[in-house]
Image (cartoon, helix red, strand yellow):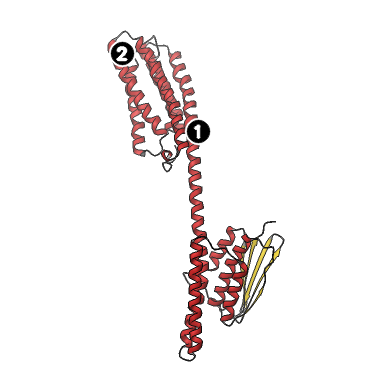
Amino acid sequence: MASEAVTPRADRRLRRARQATLVSLATGVCACVLLPAVGLSREPDRGRVVLGAVGILGFVIAQTAVLYAAVTPWLDPHWRRRAEWGLAAVAVLTVPLVGPVAAGRWPTWAWLGAALIGMTPLLVRLPAALAVAGGVLLVSVSVAWWTGGSVPRHLAVTGGIGVAVAAVNGFQVWFWDLLVEARQGQAAQARLVAVEERLRFARDVHDVLGHSLTVIALKAELAARLAPVDSERAGREAAEAQRLAASALTEVRETVHGYRVVDLDEQLAAVAGVLRSCGVRCIVLPPPPDLPQSAAIELAAVVREAGTNVLRHSRADWCRIRIEREDDVARMTVANDGADGGDPDAHSHGLRGLADRLAVAGGELRVRREGAVFTLEATVPVAS
């Protein structure tokens, strides 16, 4: 059966499909009432008629509860199991109550047996369903022998009609389960898109704040060191840290409100300016003019992370940033000297997060160290 996680009550189309399935299944329930009722009309003993009517009515109620549970996935599983056990108990009681009705004139109980076989695919798996069907056929033969009825006739009704009902019921509920699973898949896809968007947003916020806060921390540390010996330069560094903090706040606000458009040229200029202000000779080769915006967004994140790493994990004297396009691939190379060989702190998103981001876009991140020179190389696909 379909998972309980879906709620067709909140989905108009699924609710209508459920209603159509219930109507179709109810048609089979009506047959379980009308055909055994023929036996009641042919039974001369009023006592047997009353007992048979009670048995048929109880069977129909139990069958209706099970069919309802089959297309109502939000029901408590305990309630569903109670309905199934209730049907089994009522089916046993129908043998003495309904079996003798119209004995020899109409296979009354055989029609209930056909309904039982028709229900088995909804309750148990195929091997168990075959075992249950065999047991029901054995009971039908026993009832025919006990009441003096025709064994072939009972077998034909219970077996032949039962298999037909099982096929119809099984197809209806199988089709209903497909609809529920399809809606579950759509809901899961929507949740996945939301999660991916939250992760993307978190990466953007990290990229914006991580670089800015690193530079602010370095500027503040430099200002503190310069204060006793060069108060004028310390004041300039403190003012620069204040400006960077205001700029970071503006970028975060724009990111949150969805107004921020990544400009790779601006990112390159900003990172180069910060590196130069910290005493790092920075050479930037401008990106190709035909670089698509999708690739520029990913490379802008690489620039921010690479600039942060140069400041945080090296004592660089120089840094070179180059972006080039090779057919359907855009490649960025960032190299610097003064690599200290240290690892990022435990809370750093770092290169691993950047590699994950590029992998989602179909790109790749590679790093290598040659002596004191650290090189970061990122590639992203470019649509033809």
In the shown orientation, is residue 41 left or right of residue 350? left
Q: Nearer the viewer, residue 365 or 241?
A: 241
**What is the residue that sits farthest to the top in this orientation?**
44
Query: Which quadrant of the figure has residue 78?
Result: top left
Residue 160 locus on image (x, y percent): 48, 19
| Residue at 69 percent of width and 59 percent of height | 328
| Residue at 39 percent of width and 33 percent of height | 69
In the shown orientation, is residue 384 left or right of residue 275? right
Disc nearest the viewer among 1 and 2: 1
Spatial CA span between label 1 and label 2: 39 Å
| Circle 1 SS class | helix
* Residue type pointed to by label 1: Phe
| Circle 2 SS class | helix
Residue 342 locus on image (x, y percent): 53, 76
Query: Which quadrant of the figure has residue 337?
Result: bottom right
In the shown orientation, is residue 53 left or right of residue 255? left
**What is the residue that sits farthest to the bottom in this orientation?**
229
Residue 317 locus on image (x, y percent): 61, 82
Vertical position of residue 371 compared to residue 233: above or below: above
Q: Circle 2 is placed at which residue position?
A: 49
Q: Which mark is residue 175?
A: 1
Q: Nearer the viewer, residue 136 or 272?
A: 272
Lower sequence index among marks 1 and 2: 2
* Circle 1 crowding by C-alpha within 10 Å: few under 14, some 14–19, many from 20: some
